[in-house]
Image (cartoon, coloured by chain):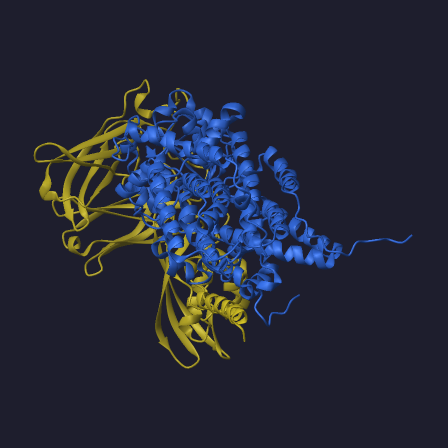
Amino acid sequence: MNKGRVLAVFITAATVALIAIGTLWPGKTALQYSGGKNLLRTSSTPQAAVENLGDEIRLRAWGAAYSSLGNKAEFSQSDFVHDLTGYYLSLRTYATLESFEVRPLHASSDQAEVRLRMHWSSVVGPFTTTRDLQVVKNGDRWNVDWPLVRKTVVPPQVIPENYLRWDVIYRGPGDDWGVQDVEAPHVRIVDMHPVQRAEGVVVLGELLNEDVVPAYVSVRATLQSKSGSPISTEGSFDKISHILLPKQVTPFFVNFPNATLSDVGSIRMEPLSGLVSASAGPVIVIENQQLNPAPGATVTGQLVNQSGQVVNIAHILETLYDKTGQVVWVADQYTDHALLPLTPIPFDIHIPEDLARKVSSERTIVETYSVGGVH
Amino acid sequence: MERIESVAPSSRPLPISLILMAALAVHLPLMLIRLPLNSYDANFHIFFASHYLHHWFNPWNTKWYAGFSQTTYPPLPQQWVALVSHIMGLDMAYMAVQLAAILLLVVGVYRFSLLWVSPRAASFAALATVFLGSESFLVYSAGQLATTSAAPIYLNALPYLFDWIRRGSWRAFLKASVLFTAAAAAHHATLLFGSFFFAVPVLALVLLDRQGGERTSVPAFVFRTVTIVLLVGAAIAVVLLPFWIALIHYPVTQAPIPHPSRANYILSPIWGLNYFIAPYGAMILALPFIVLRGSMTVRLRPLLLGFWVAFLVGLGGTTPVGQLLLGRAFEVLTMERFTYWATLLALPFVGLLVSELIDRFRMRAVIPLALAAAFTCAFAVAWVTIRQAEGASVKVDSVAAWLNRDRHDQYRYITLGFGDKISRLAVLTDAGSVDGEWNSGRRLPELTSNGAGSLSSSKYFGQAGLDALRAMLRHADKYGLKWVIVRDPYYDPLLKFAGWRPVDMLENNTITIWSKDGVPPAVPLNAPQMPPRWQGILWGTLPFGSSILAILVVLIPGRKQEEGRGDPAFASQEDLEPGRLVS
């Protein structure tokens, strides 16, 4: 064979080999775009079957995911998709599966139980869901039996709404609440203290609306050095209830990553308030609330939407107090399910282990978001 | 009636003027309807040009990232757009510069192909350029003005490089040096990678070339190569000095941003369609010919190897080659430009194939070839409509008008769900943003530490994108960020829970403007990246000056030998190694 032919054969063979390598053992970026899928993995083990299902969910390849299920005859593809993304618009609807973990729980020759922990990213932050899956052997393949949670149906009924509502006539679009021709509502910080944590300094406290009108509130904190020069300024962002009804109290939590408390001489607090339209609805009540001690300290309970409208996302702010009534910590959680009228939704908020022993009481407030309800 | 048809194969090349007319016939109407404005990056280049239009000697642009330096991106095509816009406005100036680049590419491919194949085959290669899928893809879908401007200048420089190294012509030395410098002023990456994919094969060709007498002696080869490398290197160092200063002082260390051109095109077929089928088109059918003829013909082997490496890198994550050759740069560069270069390197082979097919089969070859060319071009042009960019249909005029009135522009803004229209908005509004589309120019830590692209498309970058958005909203006070302009209700819950409120609606209530109270007006950031005045003067003078000099120098008449390069037996059958099957 002459040199030219050798070169042609070499180039062709090398190209095919390189494409095969890149496809059978894809690099990190290629895997990211293929949803973690490569051609080598088949559903030949329970773990591989669940991993393949996880990849398909991540790619939103619903058809392929549904087809791979062992119990698909029991429900439709639409049911399966809605079970994952929410039957009503909620945090799950727009969440994307960022990663997942698979842990075998137990296995026999033709059946296994595998735990699938799914880490979702959403616009308000990441959240995790867990499903324990039965995996059954079918010939030389394993299929997942999906534990479908069926849609909750609210029975027909009439729910009277009689909550308070305040409307404000604005001067024009784009007006600052703080520059209107009316005095800003009176708000006051009733508790504030800094805490050193591994990730930095946290300023905790509570803010009270002393006025008789609702207020938009926000808290800005500036750490100052011992010489009085500013170190860093941060705001409460979403770790506060921004709309306060008259006489209502909200916790706030201002985080200063990488700061050290020993460097701080003083803290300048700037509570901001403005007049705002607001209503007391939708009314969300908390039932069966319980403080579970360490280890694994949590606050658990159920949210019940007592109004007739669907609440798409709820934000639970938990203020934890010590025996003297001082704020020890502020924890929060977003619900990943929509709150249907009169339908309890459980919550489970983690408390840091080192603080759990100091906690003797708690107070919960809930902020809500409903589609079309923000304008 | 008997039909008479000549069977004698023609050896005459197509006139270059005819090919240029074909290029005008295909691309001028598309430019006149401003089709490139729908591409991903066209508005980005127009935004840069609009800054040069108003601040030619001040590259510090305050409209993005609370201030960034345009010295982080070579300026030549954008400065030409700015200059021509005095006559026809920014949009049409962009079209004019892009069209000029397309015409220049036709000439560049013809001249480059002449190094490898016969004038007739080279003319067919130039004609194929008109219909080249990757060119249409980059012009109408990707909007890569810099890449598509630099490549033709570079290709036009290569024959002069050959003449200098092969024959020691000082005229060729001067022309090559000036053109290489102008190409770098248009796009530095083209020069850097072009040196490997294009220039190294040309140097190898010099060593193989026996025409017109003896081979070039090794000392002469080394001397001439070193001389031109040193001179061009020094010229580029001076012409782009502010760029190098910015790069050395502030290297791109931000977290890598995912790009689908790095996907595996088999595991992710949609990206294969986007980055392989659309740019290559019917050229895929010519791949076996390219490998066979390139291997069998000794003279064509360097070109084949250049093509092969560019082809493999252009496949992104389909092979491990890109990652192995580029290292960390693989996570920074986008791969479609390698595909573009691969197709340019393939064009001499395509010209050869077309020439042989037409000589042998006449009209029976012409019709399918014409159809294949038309299909390739049409598919690549249509691709921008088939697979539209996010925000392609967004109208930003009303948003710009809103920002420009009632002193709204004293605060900064970001958009969410506007895709690449943020560049368009930035051209039209006086307000500044903390977002932008030039990732290598940004320095705000909220943006650089998360591995996501523009905030406007945060959700497409998963957790990293949303983390960047939250970090920026968290620091709204610091940057005077008061307005968030939302076209995608996906982001509403975050804004609501973070204390923003809707204050106005535009475009039939499809766009909501959210505001945060208590935000102080934006103040200029005292960024260390701000170039001093002398750098601004250099930036406004040397890159553009290099292109003027290139035009003047190229007009110096060359000697017959330089222009015609004798009467070579380009890639003819005598060059074939024994044993080849001649088709």
Colour assignment, chain B: blue
Q: Work out which residue is located at the far top of the displayed protein and give it.
A: A181
Relative to B60, B359 lies left or right:
right
Q: In the image, what residue occupies the spot 49% across and 79% down? A: A140
Measured as percent of width and height from the top left, residue A93 is found at 45, 50
**Camera-side residue of A178 and B141:** B141
Q: Quadrant of residue B102?
A: top right
Establish if B143 lies above or below A109: above
Relative to B213, A188 lies left or right:
left
Measured as percent of width and height from the top left, residue B366 is found at 71, 53
**Camera-side residue of A325 and B260:** B260
**Camera-side residue of A300 and B520:** B520
Relative to B22, B135 lies left or right:
left
Q: Work out which residue is located at the far right of the displayed protein and give it.
A: B1
Picture mark count: 0
Q: Work out which residue is located at the far bottom of the displayed protein and give it.
A: A109
Which chain is in yellow here? A
Indicate the quadrant containing the C terminus of chain B: top left, top right, bottom left or bottom right.
Answer: bottom right
**Camera-side residue of B87 and B537:** B537
Measured as percent of width and height from the top left, residue B1 is found at 91, 52
Measured as percent of width and height from the top left, residue B387 is found at 55, 47
Residue A33: in sight, yes or no?
Answer: yes
Establish if B341 lies above or below B145: below
Residue A157: in sight, yes or no?
Answer: no
Establish if A7 lies above or below B211: below
Establish if B468 lies above or below B299: above
